[in-house]
Amino acid sequence: MSVAVKHLNADTSFLLTFSSKPNSPTNEVASRDGAFSVLIDPWLDGPSIVTAPWFAKTEHKIPSAVQHLSELPAPDVVIVSQNKPDHCHKATLLQLPPDGKTIIAADPGAAKAIKSWDHFDPAKVRGLRKYDPKVKSGGSLRLSIPALSPHGFPGEVHISFIPAKHYMTGLHNAIGVTYRPPTRTKSIAPIATVDLPKTTRYFHVPLSPMTVPPASPQPPLTPLANRPMSFDQPAQVDNVIQAVGPFSFRGHRPRLSRSSNTASSEFLPSTDKPIIRVSPESERDEGTIVHNIVTIPDRSPRVGAAFDFKLGPLPFTHLNSPPTPPDSPAWEPLSSPSNPTSTPTSPSPTSPLFHQRCISSIPSHQRSLSSVSSMPNLITPLTPARPQAVSIIYSPHGLPLSDLQPYIQNHLVRLPGALPLTVLFHSFDYAQNPWYLGGNIMMGMYGGAEIARAVMARCWISAHDEQKDDRGLSVKKLRVKRIGADEVRKHLGEGEHGEWLRQNGWTCDVRQLEVGKEMFIGPLRES
């Protein structure tokens, strides 16, 4: 669950290599490892002409990292975000072999133009439908990746097209890409699990703080075996235990004592031999609610055993004893004070009850892993967690956040690991034309910051910010505000939303990736 990003030109052509491994350089990944490559808006060399050279002609000032697509491994998918020649560059796309494995996923207008060239198999050119949350999978293109073993899950690449609603030029849109890596196992848990033998009733134990041994020894805790419980009963019941005045417990409900030290109330303070007192009949009124303290008997020795459900008979020798066994609490009238010098009788170290208590007094989260590790028939001790997804939003010209929200709320939010967003591709520079020449060309830092904050982007890479050689009528009145990475970083932390995110630990790696440079984004580290 990682992605490597390589900038092929100084503008907006990128090669993305997704991997199922958390740290794999691109020269080491292969399709057998679940790797998947995506080439975005390739334009390597030659001019980009809109309508005619007199209207708009653009050329690179900085040479591209490669001069021909044959210098790159054949990509699995080529994404063409719009039907403009600087994104859908015919001379570059025709460098792809017509009978290769590459699928072209394109804006509907671009897909129509590419099919008209009669170069590619029409089945390999897929026009992207507008993302619709009311349709299954949003109507997005879904590509399956084979599982890494017969016992694993297949991976999936999900490509979505999100156009802006109120921009007629077709410049403003976004391409959403999510990669869910294939696996070697059928695990669906978000955390690693321990596999128990099939002789047990349950086969997976989550590796949570309750099952991982603590870093340092913990003070001894009293197990659940002797925790006190409270029950409310009418005062006229025979054998009343410890009557208390009605002013203290009227309206009192049954409750279990809980401990703030554990998540499951497993360890609770109690005494080894609680004293239970009985009040005389004269001190009780009819209908009075009394508070009874009852000690729950110790656990069965089966609980302390290491997942062995074929034990012999219980080791207790006093099960047929009278209702008041030696370990039961002593009865004492309320009026007579207890003897402070009396010492409760403890079981003999040789008795089964003593050994059972020694086992029970060990915290269960310390017993569980040691019990599992002692099993001779434990073949696969650990099942890895299901890898998290990698998420990309590519929007070089930008679009309003409101148009992107349905995709965020219905796809990214529901896909484990897709948020925070892995990488945002968006322009830094702000470009504006008069309304009769298309109006806004690039939303730049201002629109990108709004998206980056909303999805808490881990990385923001500059896209479409090359200072190109522009000529023609359409660019004579174009006004461009150049913005650097430092200014973008500062702007992200401004405003109420940005300040709140910054105070809560959010940081965004803002990059202007040079031509031919490559960066690697691994999985999000758990705090």
Image: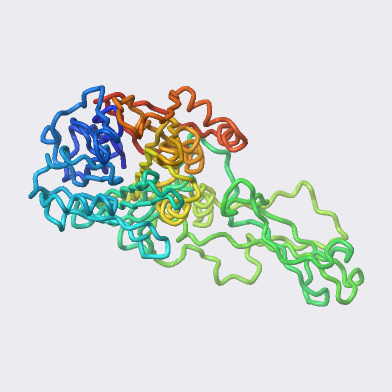
Q: Position of residue 207 (x, y in %)?
A: 42, 48
Q: Using the image, determine if residue 97 lies above or below residue 431.
A: below
**Considering depth in this image, is 385 or 353 the residue closer to the camera?**
385
Q: Residue at x 56, y 36 (%)?
A: 501
In the figure, is residue 285 to the left or right of 146?
Answer: right
Q: Position of residue 190 (x, y in %)?
A: 40, 51
Q: Residue at x 40, y 47 (%)?
A: 418
Q: On the image, which quarter does residue 286 sit in?
A: bottom right
The colour style of the image is rainbow
Q: On the image, which quarter does residue 7 sit in?
A: top left
**Considering depth in this image, is 512 or 499 the residue closer to the camera?**
512
Q: Residue at x 74, y 57 (%)?
A: 275
Q: Position of residue 179 (x, y in %)?
A: 31, 48
Asked whether the viewer can see residue 17, the reply is no
Q: Position of residue 425 (x, y in %)?
A: 37, 37
Quadrant in the picture for the N terminus = top left
**Considering depth in this image, is 187 or 276 the residue closer to the camera?**
187
Q: Residue at x 37, y 32 (%)?
A: 461
In the figure, is residue 136 to the left or right of 105?
Answer: right
**Considering depth in this image, is 519 or 291 the residue closer to the camera?**
519
Asked whether the viewer can see residue 500, the reply is yes
Count of numbered labels shown in the rendering: 0
In the figure, is residue 245 to the left or right of 402?
Answer: right
